[in-house]
Image: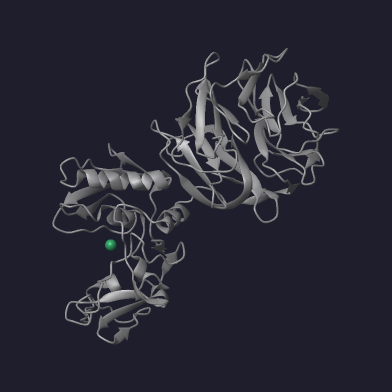
Amino acid sequence: MAASMSGVQKWPNFTVYYTPFDNHPAKHIIEAALKEVSNRTPIRFVKRTTELNYVTILFVDGNSSPVGMKGGEQFIELNANGGQSLHELCHTLGLIHEQERSDGQQIIRTYFKADQPIDIGCYVIPIDKTGIVNPSNPNMRPACNSINLTEYDPLSIMHYTAEQGNDYGKPGQWTMVLRSNLTFYVGVQDRAKLTKLDAEGLNSFYNPWSTFRPIPGGKTNAAPTMVTYNGKLYAFWNGHKDDGIFYATNDGTGWTSQEKIPGIGTRTSPAVAVYNNKLYVTYCGWHYDGIFSVSFDGRNWAGQIQIKDFKTKHAPALASDNSNIYLAWNNEHNDGIYYSVFNGTSWTEQLKIPNVGTNNSPALAMYKGLLFAAWNGYHNDGIFYSAFNGNNWTNQQKIGDIKTYNAPALTAHPSLHNPAEENLYLAWKPIGDERIWWTNYEDTNWARQVNTVYKCKTSQALCSFQGKLFMSWQHLEDDIITHVSM
Ligand SMILES: [Zn+2]
């Protein structure tokens, strides 16, 4: 796809309620279509109980759906083979046919009769595929008020499939080709999958994130980090020229100007946690000579201390609960992820998360009473996680199929769909993509993988604050620290 129209209504809370369709002969194909959408967008599908707005899937000899949420009960008609399931579902979510886009006829050429290209521009004759003018068939009428969410996608799930071959001039034959390549027959190829642009278009239509904004004055060469403390959101980052660790605070109305933690510096990202009403900032020493920590009581910074003889060349990670602070780091030889626990008085000796490793930094978060660690696999072979109950780490598990060169970000935050339920959120920058992607652990899996439109240089920071999930990062073009929330 990647187009909608003005006036099309979205489904609130990224949730579509539906009547169970167990008796539909294409049940499994419909289920796969729901899964394809919920794995690649923030949208999820929930069986209806008493909700007022919902979808009922009918088994009829035909395929159709209205565009967007209509209010009350609405229908998707699907025939026995269910091949149109994903296409009709995308209509229900608000997408129109790709070839109806306002720019459609600039990209494609539609042939109705041999040697006679017919341009169907805005509000020009609607023609059906018999080649006969048929005002009652709206499907070939370009939608001049379309909202084009991505570039034109000739292979979109929402694109009509053109007839192939050279006999399109005959009665009943027609075709659509690219203007830039008259031998390229346009149209959906895989009816079970959203194309890359289909998913991006849906994610831009159902974008849960706010417009991005800079943290004033903030510039870095690494990822920022964030925490909430004394009712404010704090962001910390390594100065752009490795000239110190800077921070700014946000009380919900905007950011203060940046300040500098006196007398310290690093060449990687700092880590931050709150414990016993103090804020702890931990970082790799400027000369890679150890892991250091400073604390803040809300007014003053206490001088730095060195934590044991721990060594790293990467950013450490911190998390805390009511009992402890947890520190994790990739050791200086990249031969494993180590951790130590601070009980308010002293740090334990270094311990190792069994049988795991990375070339970057780990990420830590508390979730449902457990300490979660996530990291980029040693061979950039995926993002893995493990949970710690105070005694043991679970065996590592892989989060979907993700490839990255950078450390991920991790935090707990209420579900996008159900604020009473807490989820674990993960953000990362994929290999070959400048944009930030995210997922959340919901309904006992990490299936969802959603792109944002925000471009980043390295890793991100995630933090829950005032009921919103904040994300910040080093902006791709200018290294400015940028943030959004949802
Ligand atoms: Zn359609």
Residue 227 occupies quadrant:
top right
Give coordinates of residue 48: x percent, y percent: 28, 39
The total of numbered circles placed on residues is 0
Residue 141 occupies quadrant:
bottom left
Residue at point 69%, 43% (across, down): 222
Q: Is residue 57 above or below residue 201?
A: above
Residue at point 36%, 63% (across, down): 155
Give coordinates of residue 442: x percent, y percent: 42, 34
Q: On the rendered image, what quadrant is the N terminus found in?
A: bottom left
Give coordinates of residue 64: x percent, y percent: 23, 59
Q: Which one is in front, 45 or 434?
A: 434
Residue that extends furthest to the left in the rendered view of this protein = 61
Residue 419 visible in the current orientation: yes
Q: Is residue 46 above or below residue 83?
A: above
Left or right of 436 on screen, residue 276: right
Q: Answer with the quadrant where ligand 1 appears in the image.
A: bottom left
Give coordinates of residue 34: x percent, y percent: 31, 45
Residue at point 75%, 18% (across, down): 308
Residue 70 visible in the current orientation: no
Q: Which one is in front, 28 or 57?
A: 28
